[in-house]
Amino acid sequence: MTTGKPLSVAIVGGGIGGLCLAIGLLQCPHIKLDIYEAAPEFKEIGAGVALGPNAQRALEMISPAAAKAFLRHATPNISPEHAKLWFDFRYGLRGPNYGTVLGKVENQTGQQTVHRAKFLEELAKLVPKDISHFGKRLVRVEELDPGQGVRLHFQDGESVTAQCVIGADGVHSVVRNSLLRGEAKAMFSGIVSYRGLIPMDAARAKLGKYAEDSYMWTGEDGMVMTYPIDFGKTLNVVCAKYGRESWDYPTYMLPVDASLLKKDYEGWGEIPSKVVDMIEKPTLWAMLEHPPAPFYNSANIAIMGDAAHATTPFQGQGAGQAIEDALVLCRLFRYVRTPALVAPALAAYDAVRRERTQRVVKTSREAIEEYSLYHPKVNGDVGKWRELWSQRMKWIWDIDLAEHNDEALQKMKSLVQPPLERNDAPIVIKDLRSLMYRLRSILR
């Protein structure tokens, strides 16, 4: 039974995940949608963001227009023969094994990256201006009495109420902090990353063919990763090191002197050393991740993307998992036509998304170490390295998203009687609270 009154949904955070969710929910005429963004406009920090085949399929399923927004600015590998290449892995340390080809890992779409700001700008064009509210820095989330929804309190003194709130507010999420009562906050992963950009003309002059496609130069405590962005006009560089005990800076990203980067990469071979030498203004980032959250939702609140499962970037899945989150939420909310259906929808979202996304966080942290030729699983054997990496990413890239959505819908239906297809009878939630906690204990 529907009331005829639109269901109010508030998205906190207008990054890639939040806007993808908004684009999907805008296709639901029974939803009144608002987006609250702390910044004065939709914006992203950083340069390139890669979307794997799973993320690109999810984007297409949310909206063909959103998929086109990505492809309009996406940069693939320049060499035609590397169209399906994710990364060409090479051993990067100076010595007899330098330059050894460990393996060329491929997928359906290859390495496709886009400038974060340009992608977000294209997504923002698909969102009506009148539902976007800027300068809204969230300070407190108040869950009201059953049936009354959630009240959001902003730094500027304004408060708003919605029947459902989705926190897409990033790694330092206020919504997450409220939902989990301050537990499971983002933590330093022990990995730092230097980032920089090199004009492609300069990169080609010094690196030759190694400037035009995606390469990963690996060592025993880190890697040097390069790939083209901005339609091949720029080479994006990420140099990561692991095994750090602490982060001793007041912010999680800061400009540093190039000498610090060069010192960290002494002893590396010819090509990675040339890459490091060409970065004139590197930035240093602390790689953060979330410890596993026991749940992603309450009756009227859910968290998604970096707010739910912030991860290191070593499987290229940060944005991709946020887009997958958005897809599942969009599909579930097609059926959420009354406030009573919000809780079972969010419980179903938690049940199908938490296990997968937390596995991504865990395996991403492991990936940077498993890049190495001398990881214990490989122990210097190139054949074992190739065997490991030939299948390692399949479970991420090859997910059947239609089946994933169906699983979520079936879980939602199991919490509701009568079946969702019927709209002529009162909706009864079957012992929702105990069932939600049972699901959480099973999947924890």
Image (spheres, rainbow, N blue to C red):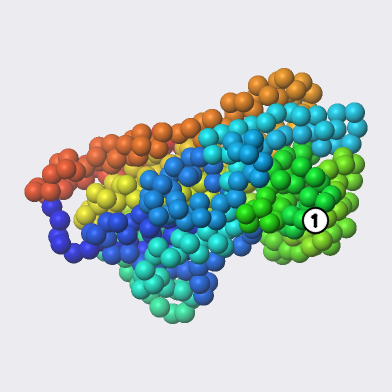
Residue 207: image x %, image y %? 81, 46
Residue 8 position in % (x across, y down) = 29, 64
The residue wearing badge 1 is: 202
- Name which residue type carries label 1: Ala
Nearer-the-camera pick, 307 or 66: 66
| Residue 254 visible in the snapshot | yes
User: Closer to the camera, 302 or 432?
Assistant: 302
Residue 256 falls left or right of residue 424? right
| Mark 1 surroundings within 10 Å by alpha-carbon count, few (fewer than 14), some (14 through 19), many (20 or more) | some
Residue at 68% from the left image edge and 60% from the top image edge: 252
Q: Residue at x 75, y 23 (%)?
A: 382
- Residue 347 left/right relative to 137: left
Q: Nearer the viewer, residue 402 or 183?
A: 402
Provide residue 259's location: percent of width, then percent of height. Answer: 88, 58
Q: Is residue 439 above or below residue 390?
A: below
| Image vertical order of residue 196 relative to residue 224, above or below | below
